[in-house]
Each structure stands twice: as C-alpha cells, then as structure tokens.
Amino acid sequence: DGVTRDGVNRRGVNHYQQLGIAVDASSDDVRRAFKEQARRHHPDLNATSSAADRVLAEEQMRLLNAAWTVLSVPDRRAAYDREIGLVDDRSSAFVRKLSHEGFVPYHEADEDDDDSWRYEPDVGDPRAAPSRRATMIPMVMTLVAVALVVVWMIIDAEPVGIAALVAGVIAAVSFFMLPILAMAKAADFEKS
C-alpha cells in the first residue's frame, strides 16, 4: 500500500493527511473525505488527461485506498494510531480490557438481592377468573361476524351486513371488556 513502518507513505504524509482530515475525525468524516478525494483523483475521471497525469491520479488513488482501508475499520484504525504514536499502548490495552468485561448487575452471594419472586408461579385468585363461557364470547362472536360477512358477500342482503357489523362490534367490545371485568372482580375479592 506504499506505507512505511512509521505509517507514512512515500510522499511523507500519513493516512489522515492523505484524506485531509484531523486525527480525531469521526467515521462519517473519514467516509466523506474519502469520497470527496476519490471523486477528485479517480483515474477514470482523468482519462482525457495526459499519460503522466493519469499515472499520478492512479498513484493518488492507491494512496487514498490505502488510507480508506485502514481508517474505515475501527480496529485497523486503532492499530494504525498506535503505530504512528497517536495512542499510548498501555492506555489502549486498559480500554480494551474494560470494554470486554461483562456487566454483572449483582452477585448471587449478596444477601440483599432477593429475586425469588421471579421464580414463583403467577397464580391469580380462581374466584376472580371469568367463566369459560365468558371467555368464549369474543371468539364466538368473531366467528359469527366472519360467517355473516361471507353470507352477506354471497347474497348481498343489507340486514345480513348490519348483523355482521353488530356481531363484530360485540366481539371487539367483549374482547376489551373481559379483562377489565376480571380485574374488577379480583379487586372486589381483595376488599373482602
């Protein structure tokens, strides 16, 4: 890629200088700078130039691609920054170590972390549960509404369409009212 050991290319500039960005540039800034430079120096855009200009454009494009290859990938960029002396190896190793440690919200040995309630079954008061017939109302009314819609589409009778609409409304209301009635019933049992 034309880069020497100290991260500098044959022209004496590093990848940041090649793209014309600061060393603390964001990944979006790196991408924008690369695209801008690539548009300016791409050999295909310099096809009408002289052979010497085209060779210079190809060389410039190789250096831009080398910079992009390194600076567009966070791990490669971090390694490059260490290589050219922008980051101290000791501090980056500490950051890497911290970033790979898993978060543990509590230790199982802690006495005050009582989460046994999580493993208890969630059993409600059976007296507050709605009857089996009541729980069937929304489903049965939905089936009746669907059947009436099918019949209405076949025979095109307005009373059948109205009956389908009424059955659908009853199904929807009962679907929403059933849990509310069960909670009200449970609240009454809790009071007594």
Image (spheres, helix red, strand yellow):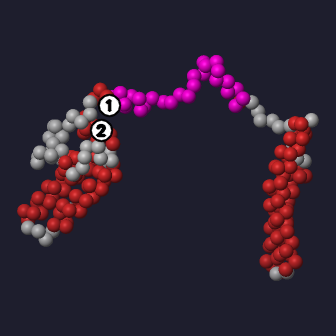
Q: Is residue 70 visible?
A: no
Q: Which mark is residue 1?
A: none
First along the sequence among labels 2 and 1:
2
Kindly indicate the quadrant of the structure image that contains residue 33.
Answer: bottom left
Q: Is residue 100 magenta?
A: yes
Measure the alpha-carbon separation of dots 2 and 1: 9 Å
Where in the figure is residue 88, as x and y percent of width and height? 26, 30
Give the amino acid type for the residue marked by disc 1 in the picture: Ser
Tell me the magenta residue range: 92-118
**Residue with the mark numbered 2:** 78
Q: Quadrant of the C terminus?
A: top right
Decide: is 58 above or below 103. below
Kindly indicate the quadrant of the structure image that contains residue 164.
Answer: bottom right
Where in the figure is residue 155, as x and y percent of width and height? 83, 80
Estimate how packed mark 1 is, as few (under 14), some (14 to 19) or many (20 or more) residues with alpha carbons within 10 Å. Answer: some
Residue at position x 19%, y 50% in the image = 18
Q: Secondary structure at mark 2?
A: helix
Residue at position x 90%, y 52% in the image = 133
Q: Are marks 2 and 1 in contact (CB under 8 Å)?
A: yes
Q: Secondary structure at mark 1?
A: helix
**Residue with the mark numbered 1:** 92
For residue 101, side relative to residue 75 (left or right): right
73 or 178, which lies in front?
178
Where in the figure is residue 150, as x and y percent of width and height? 80, 73
Q: Is residue 152 magenta?
A: no
Q: Is residue 154 visible?
A: yes
